[in-house]
Image: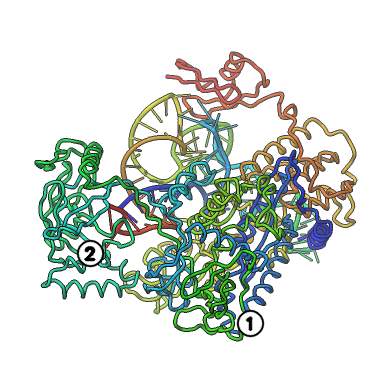
Amino acid sequence: MAIYPFLAVEKKWQKFWLENKTFRTPDAIEPGKPKSYILDMFPYPSGSGLHVGHPEGYTATDITARYRRMKGFNVLHPMGWDAFGLPAEQYALETGTHPLITTERNINRFRAQLQDLGFSYDWDREISTTDPDYFRWTQWIFLKLYERGLAYQAEVAVNWCPALGTVLANEEVIDGKSERGGHPVIRKPMRQWMLRITQYAERLLADLEELDWPDSIKEMQRNWIGRSEGAEVDFEVDGMLDAKIRVFTTRPDTLFGATYMVLSPEHPLVVRLTTADQSTAIAHYREEAARKSDLERTELQKNKTGVFTGAYAINPVNHHRIPIWIADYVLSSYGTGAIMAVPAHDERDYAFARQFKLPIIEVVFGGDISKEAYVGDGKLVNSASQWVSIDGLSVPDAKKKIAVWLEEKGLGVRKVNYKLRDWLFSRQRYWGEPFPVIFVDGQPQPLKPEELPLLLPEVETYTLSGTGESPLATIDSWVNTTDPETGKPARRETNTMPQWAGSCWYYLRFVDPKNPSALIDPAKEKYWLPVDLYVGGAEHAVLHLLYARFWHKVLYDVGVVTTKEPFHKLVNQGMILGEMEYTRYLNAEGQLVSAELVDDSGVDKRTGEELEAENVVEGDIKKEGIHFVLVAHPHIRVSARSFKMSKSRGNVINPDDVVKEYGADSLRLYEMFMGPLTQVKPWSMKGVEGVHRFLNRVWRLMVDELTGELLPAVVDAEPTRDELHELHATIKRVSDDIETMNFNTAISAMMIFLNEAQKWERRPKSVLSTFVLLLAPFAPHIAEELWQKLGHDNTLAYAPWPDVNEEYLVQDTIEIPVQINGKLRGKVVVPVDETKDFILDAARNDAAIAPHLQGKTVRKEIFVPGRLVNFVVG
RNA sequence: GCCCGGGUGGCGAAAUGGCAGACGCAACGGACUUAAAAUCCGUUGGCCGCAAGGCCGUGCGGGUUCGAGUCCCGCCCUGGGCACCA
């Protein structure tokens, strides 16, 4: 392949940008100038280096940043490192290397890789969450949380993962296993720091409205917060005047259908309620429930279990006596930890009632409760007593009436509940931010702000304590300290903060990264916030984004920030999968097995036999209907799909290799050309070659391959109208497509321009220069080089973005498609401003159209100006 | 089970309710070359036809409309999220 000297060109401009600090964003605010804060989700600098998924989002933001600079915006486009976290500590355990060393090494590698891709970051603003100058302020924010009662300690049954030696947040546990590594997780009571995110539930929910985020992400956050409106109702316990059971229900309208109650096994009243003859069974059940892991709880979903306490409650609406049970399908952590069970109109209660032969009473008409619970709307029935009646009402009306009645009688209150739980904020780890807290006489006492940062101690070994305590607990010299006030002996908190802490506020520090006296300067905060564009993976939909919003709101209350929300516009890039793989399967006898008989793990669905998977080249297959089959054996289907990139599958693409072979511009361009940014798409090395060829053609459009000089065809000359038409059509499409982040179609517009321009024997410099500016955000290295060759002295990074001149877009003639009964039958070419009558006439008389109208009656003529003509004939 | 996406050539994809398949890849044919690579030119949704042209075609079945990939109703498949939250 004859190629332009991309390696030399790319190195040259990377060096130029760094040395000249081309992308330095000035510290001084320029109030008159519009700002644009364009942010990537900063990476965890892992030991395996950059993945092709990283440059996808990073290129999208880089294009936007470079575009907006040329549009005259003051752009903030920084990069940093989310560098605390488990892998560096695991590595330390295995090799004895201090996490600090590993982290620094990985950061250097990541930085070099990012610089090799030509991203226009302001490297003077680089930050790492592990830097004491940074985590000093993470600790400072914790003090603010503590001050406001938003950080508290609790003895809670936590998600303890023995394999990782740490406690995980609910969000980090998937199906009873750790999100990282898939290790089993069990419940274990431990003293933990918690953050009261639930206090912000309503604001976190309400303020989603104003955000320019994908609906799916907003919806996921709404579901996670899980607001539900209902009522809390008190049930008296028969024979115990001082005991009341409070339940939460979203269906107070079904109170007459409550035939039993269920308390969670952990409910504080259980022991008091239990009668003597039931006490053994209850105690046994409670023990078992406590021992159960999350995994077991999930697995046992189908078979409901529970035990009768022996006690009865009084239903407040009709004074019926109903039995009180305990069962682990009622969660202690939601609502009041107790429910009234309405089996006729709740699926879970229905299953439980069936299992234990409890009565089912229909109170909403419309279903068939002999078959299943009915949860829909309908007229209320069987819902009257001497005290109150809601018979005949609809569900919403009944809810209202009964709620008012309950409140009047003092039997209940309207209530809003959330699924969202408080945030478990402790990790039993070394490599994290230490809590700025000491314990004096066992009581927590925050450090003074001027004592920050509280540094991590040096350690000899990283062996875990084994008890589940942090490795910090083993370092006596660090743990034991004194209270600066009283001189009393004190102990330090040995847990550290979770990885989320540092990433909750880094976008603020980028605005003012070196400020020694404040987290962020108020004037700078006012100018730069909120983040205008935030791009990252959808895997952070709930965790990072919810936590960061929570901290931001706290900082808003504290007065540190003046916006309610941190990230105005959010975009999730889609995952990049490995190359498409075609696979055929063979059994032990060497016989081919058709793909529809094979499950995802390569096992024969009929026999359970593990099959041998073999890759097939594209030439050996063909498409048969919607499936691919072997050409040689058309009845044998092959599986055709692309997989997530993973080391074990061996389909990982290393960006370094792509850069070496095709150049950074090609990688950037390909990642944008693959398809829409937000979509999942498979990698294709052939596709990289395709865009690489495009860049070569751009080079050869202007430069003699052999001499490296401008071609003689490139001249200072007035462009023709046709040339200007092509150019301005391209300016329009590229500009519009960058604004809407449709980068793939922007690139195709440039390809179309190139295909045209290649035909020009005489190539005006002014047209080529403008085209180079359009290309610059996408492929900045080659663009800078061509810009220079075209005779411009300075970097094009701040050259004004070309304006569209609409005048060049208008054409003299226009081609109008002509349909008969909605079917395309011909086309007419007419002057662009011609009248309706003229065009219809031209259409009727067109050689391709006239025969279709012969002998028919035209019933209707549809004329869409500039678009089409349609004759309806009969 | 519930809530979101998505389903268009051999592949990645494009298309304010108005010419389906732009652009790219792959494939095929040609030019250049001793040859190959690279490059350049051309063909390329399927079927029928020598051709002109015709018929079919955006997961499936209906509907609205002069006109539907696009809007509405009902399904199927697929990716992701949630899942005893009362």
Please say whether residue A858 is visible from this viewpoint: yes
* Residue drawn at (52%, 29%) of the image: A824
Q: Percent from the top left, x then y, of residue A356? A: 14, 63
Label 2 SS: loop
* Residue drawn at (57%, 76%) of the image: A487
Q: Percent from the top left, x then y, of residue A88? A: 59, 75
Q: Which residue is mark 2?
A: A269
* Residue drawn at (62%, 60%) of the image: A42
Graded by Cα atoms within 10 Å as few (under 14), some (14 to 19) or many (20 or more), the crowding at tag 1 reads: some
- Above or below, A478 against A341 in this view is below
Q: Name the N-terminal-most of marks 1 and 2.
A: 1
* Residue drawn at (72%, 28%) of the image: A806
Spot the residue most to the front: A486
Could you tell me which chain the residue with mark 2 belongs to? A
Amino acid residing under circle 2: Leu
Q: Which residue is mark 1?
A: A97
Spot the residue most to the top: A837
